[in-house]
Image (tube, grey):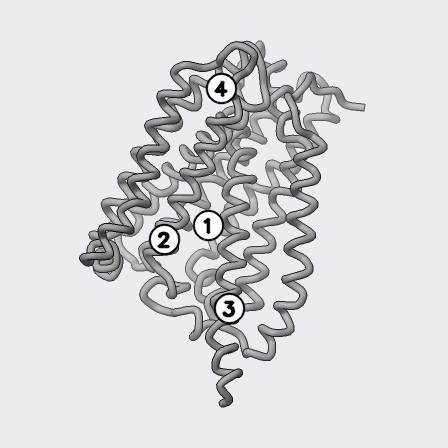
Amino acid sequence: MSEGATSAAYWLPVIFIGLMGLAVLVYAILDGYDLGVGILLPMGEEDEPQRDTMIASIGPFWDANETWLVLAVGLLLIAFPIAHNLVLMHLYIPAAIMLVGLIMRGVAFDFRAKAAVGHKLAWDRTFKAGSLTTSLSQGYMLGQYVMGFTPGWQAQLFSAVSALGATAAYSYMGSAWLVLKTENELQARSVRWARRAGRATLLGVLSVSVINPLVNPTVFDRWFTYPLVMFVLLIPTLCFLAFIFNDVLLARMPKSNDRHSALPFTMVVIIFLMCFIGLAFSFFPDIVPGQLNIWQAASATASLKFILVGALIVIPVILAYTAFSYRVFRGKATELHYH
């Protein structure tokens, strides 16, 4: 094999795992907040105007946000087919449950606009249930992945904690989004939701941060080897400081003239980013922890070169469309009307 081919064989899997990581991170942030809004929907009959405003805040975005999930799974399939087969073999049932939740959300979102007035609450409940189902299944799958798909009650318990933590994290993101996009009573209510969800998310992050190195000796060695430990511990430190800063900030909100309303959402994005970097640092270059690295799982080098051309066209287009849509629909959510 030539030196150029060897270089391509090494770097192409790295590039593709980076692109896949970008897709997963963007999905977790963008679909995270609209899942969170769905989880937070209040179900009282008197809450219908607030539910309408909450739905309006995600209406222009929520369907397109799921494009990033499709992109991440597509990249996994075409760039790392062995890993795709191995992961789905272990996660077939929770992945199917997640798809059921996504279908419930899609059906409920459309039908709430077309159903008789007396049935609208039922479809709102379906949207909320679909959001919960999706977030719990994603958190469970993350827990199984972190545990390397090992059997036993310990892995199931960790996955259950991860499911609850992911649900709290999405609720945190969703409530911060509502602080940004809403006004008056709903904004004040969202601030309260954000403080409670933030504290629950912090507990989840701390639980995962403690358990993961204990059950994965390789992860423990990577994080606590001197002198590297002096640098990598900046990641959890920054994450913890972001939690504290956001809690203090939310305690003083809402502010007059809507000051700093975008800051809570920005801080939650930073928290998600720090958590993602921490997970990536823990497991790279493994694509299936303890079983398979990116070079073992990668497609042929010639195939990756061909796929890369398409990826470098498609991903900037999706990014540009996403940025454009958020620019067009910037500002506060208004009263929802169906035509």
Camera-nearest label, 1 or 4 = 4
State how far apart marks 3 and 2 are (Cα).
19 Å
**Residue that numbered label 2 is attached to:** 144
Residue under the image location 49 percent in, 62 percent down: 17
Of the image marks 3 and 2, the number of the one nearer the N terminus? 3
Quarter of the rendering containing residue 65: top right
Q: How far apart are the alpha carbons under marks 4 and 3?
A: 40 Å
Q: Work out whether 193 lies above or below 158.
A: above
Amino acid under disc 2: Gln
Callout 1, which amino acid? Pro
- Is label 3 in contact with label 2 (beta carbons under 8 Å)? no
Q: Gap in Å between the C-alphas at discs 4 and 2?
A: 31 Å
What residue is pinned by disc 4?
190
Element class at badge 4: helix
Horizontal and vertical percent for residue 72? 55, 55
Residue at (32%, 45%) from the top-left corner? 235
Q: Which residue is mark 1?
A: 94
Residue at mark 3: 80
Q: Residue 182: percent from the left, percent from the top?
A: 58, 19
> Which quadrant holds residue 206?
top left
- Residue drawn at x 48%, y 57% is 92
**Reading the chain from its start, which is encountered first: label 1 or label 3?**
3
In this picture, residue 168 sits left or right of residue 161? right
